[in-house]
Structure formats: structure tokens, C-alpha cells
Image: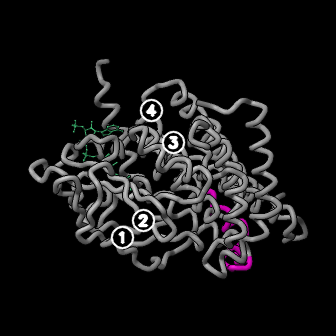
Amino acid sequence: MSLDPETFSQVKDTVSRFVREKLIPAEDIVEESNEVPESIIQDMRDLGLFGLSIPEEYGGLGLNMSQECEVIHELCQASLSFRSVIGTTVGIGSQGLVMTGTEEQKQEYLPRLATGEISSSFCLTEPDAGSDAASLRTVAVRDGDSYVLNGTKRFITNALRAGMLTVMARTDPDKKGASGISAFLVDPKTPGVTIAKADAKMGQRGTQTSDIIFEDVRIPASALMGEKEGQGFYTAMRVLDRGRLHLSSVSTGISERIIHEALTYASERKQFGQVIGEFQLVQAMLADSQADLFAGKAMTMDAAARFDAGEEIPMLAACCKMFTTEAAGRIADKAVQIHGGAGYMSEYKVERFYRDVRLLRLYEGTTQIQQLVIARNMLKNVGN
Ligand code: COS
């Protein structure tokens, strides 16, 4: 699956224009109001952004991974909260369904997800199951033609606006680890589902995360993704591999924007009778940031091309996620430093971006989980 080069180039140009003309000017409103204006969400629907990764036969744009990474890099030249509106639908919320759903399940949800009529959330994390995802405790007990769900999910992005939840739950209580977990497609309006109020966070204002509580939620047996029990954890891992490439592009996109802010400031701000960009110690910070950005973009595009060619990429995706998110942290830190005292002031965007990018090293697997995935794969391949 991929979009033809000419149409793809138009999509990319349109996204760049949208970022420049609509998103960047709206950044302050989002920061102040803690929400993305409905008019912008409608623009995103009109541009087809919710359907980037959904195959064309279900109404999406059908981008391949390389194309998705390029578009996400462009989109993330603006505040990360905008990307977050479509992020769960484009990435982890829909891709399990694309990979393993039955035709009927795909027909039920994908066309509406692609247009943005509904959006989706990915429900894996729980109060006691974060990095150790396989220890999750939400249960789905089979009862005739239904399953009954009980449990709590935590930090679920876009839960408050979701029209479809991909929920990982334990169907086999005798199997403690990965193989007892199944994935379900759940309508959040089902009786017994409670979505808690949005969490207060360090940054990314305008992005909403919440707990979801399932209390005796009866869902039809046909909601079991792929109609196969015991596949949920493996699907989640595959979805996260892909999601980690998506997030790498998020990181390189916002890194490029932060470097632009630092460079602009360094070219205008004068001290000791000259612009500070002429000082070599400032140049060193700019140069390190640019090299980090170039490396991150190159590795992400390489891994995405390999994914599109059908290669197994869990280790490479973890390398990209680890490197690009850590690089975004370094770049944001240097941008604040280049701004001096001004960098600590909310009036300048780098203060906000510094807080926003802190999340990148935490969600969809912390840096330490990426290290674990990389090293385990290296050790597995010894002697091959
Ligand atoms: N693709 C497919 N299958 C995978 C896989 C992948 N990328 N990674 C692991 N698996 C399989 C393993 O092969 C193993 O299969 P068996 O049951 O047949 O043995 C199973 O999944 C369990 O894997 P493993 O033994 O490695 O599981 P662990 O519990 O030790 O750890 C980690 C797995 C830590 C990698 C996983 O829990 C993880 O990614 N945690 C972070 C979760 C996360 O990113 N949360 C963010 C929430 S979403 S915003």
C-alpha cells in the first residue's frame, strides 16, 4: 500500500501550508484554552489526516510507512497537540484492526475512522501495568455470545473523544503472561464504560488523556479482534513497533521546529556588540542539534523503508524511537540555553516545546524499554 508519488507530493505540500497558515498561528490559543479548536479538527477531517494510514479501499489515503513518516514530520513543525488529535487514529488506535481485524470489523470501523467521523484510542496501560504491559489485569470473561469486561485503563490519549477503543484484556486467567491477552473493539458508549476527566499534565496542553473504567461491560463476542483469543499482546507489540517509527517522525518534526526557533533567536539577539550566533559556543549548540536532527531523520526513513519492504523492524524501530526522542530532549534543552533567560519565559515558544517533548521519552515505551528491546534482539541474533 502506498499513495502515488504525485498525489503524495500534493498531500505533503498541503500539510506544510496547513501548518504554516493555520496551526502555528493557533498555537497560543491551544496553550491558553488547553484544547484544539473544533474548526481545526474539522480542517483535519477535510484534509483526510485521520485516514493517513487507513487503506484506500476503506476510505483512507493509504500511505505507506515512509510516506506517513514524511507527513508526520511536516505536521509536527507545529505544536505536538495538533498531531495528537489524529495520532491515535492514524497510529496505535487503528492499526491493530488494519493488521488483524476481520473484514466485517474493518467495514464497521475503518471508513468512519478514515473520515474522522469517529476517532480511536489504544487501551493497553493500566495503573499497575505500564512498562510491564504483559502483566495487565483487565479481564474479559466469555458469557454465551458476549464477553464481560472489567478493569481500569490509564493515561489513554483521546479517550474523551474516542468513538472506538482497542482494549487489551485477559481472556485466559490461567495464562499469566502475553498469551492470555486478547484485543477487543469497544464502543465507549456501551453501558458500564466510564471515561474519567482529563489528566493534568506537564505539557502538550490541548492533548487529553484519561482513565477508562470498565464495570461489567457486556460486549458481543464479535468484538474480539480477528475473532481469535490470545493474540492481543502480540498485536499490541506489532502496533507499537510501527507506532515507534511514527513517534520518531513526531520527534524529528518538532526538533526541526525547535532548531528553527533557536536559529532565528541566535540570528537576531545581540550581546557584546554582535548577534549571538556569531559566538562559537552558540554555534556548537546549533551544530550538535542539526547533526542530531539529520541522524534521526536518516535512521527513521531507513527503518520505514525497510518496514515497507516487509523486513522485521522491532529492533530498528526501538533504535529510532530511543535516538530521536532523546535527541529532541537534547535539542530542546540547547534551544532554551541559546535563548538564555528568555528561554525560561512562556513568551518564547521554546519553554513550551521543552515541556512538550519530555513526554516523547516516556510514552509508547520509555527509553529504557527501547534499550531492553534493542539489546534482547541483539542477543537473540548472536551466532546468526
Ligand atoms: N512483535 C511480535 N511479538 C512480540 C514482539 C513484537 N515486537 N515483542 C515481543 N513479542 C512476543 C514475544 O515473542 C513473546 O512471545 P511468546 O509468548 O510466544 O513467548 C511475547 O510477545 C512476550 O514477549 P516478551 O517475553 O519479550 O515480553 P516481556 O513481558 O518480557 O516484555 C516488552 C515485553 C517489555 C518489550 C513489552 O512489555 C513492552 O513493549 N513494554 C512497553 C509497553 C509500552 O510501550 N507501553 C506504552 C503503552 S501504549 S502508549
Residue type pointed to by label 1: Ile
- Answer whether labels 3 and 4 touch (C-beta < 8 Å): no
Q: Earlier in the sequence, mark 3 or mark 4?
A: 4
The type of residue carrying mark 2 is Ile
Task: Please report the bounds of the magenta region as a residue range.
Answer: 330-347
Front-most of residues 15 and 283: 15
Residue 313 numbered tag? 4
Residue 212's label in the rendered image is 1
Nearer-N-terminus badge (2/4): 2
- Residue beneath disc 2: 156
- Sequence-first tag of 2 and 3: 2
Q: Earlier in the sequence, mark 1 or mark 3?
A: 1
Separation of residues labelled 4 and 1 (CA atoms)? 31 Å
Q: Looking at the picture, which amino acid does disc 3 mark?
A: Cys
Q: Which residue is mark 3?
A: 320
Q: Are marks 1 and 2 in contact (CB under 8 Å)?
A: yes
**Image quadrant assignment for residue 353:** bottom right
Seen from the viewer's position, the closer of residues 188 and 262 is 188
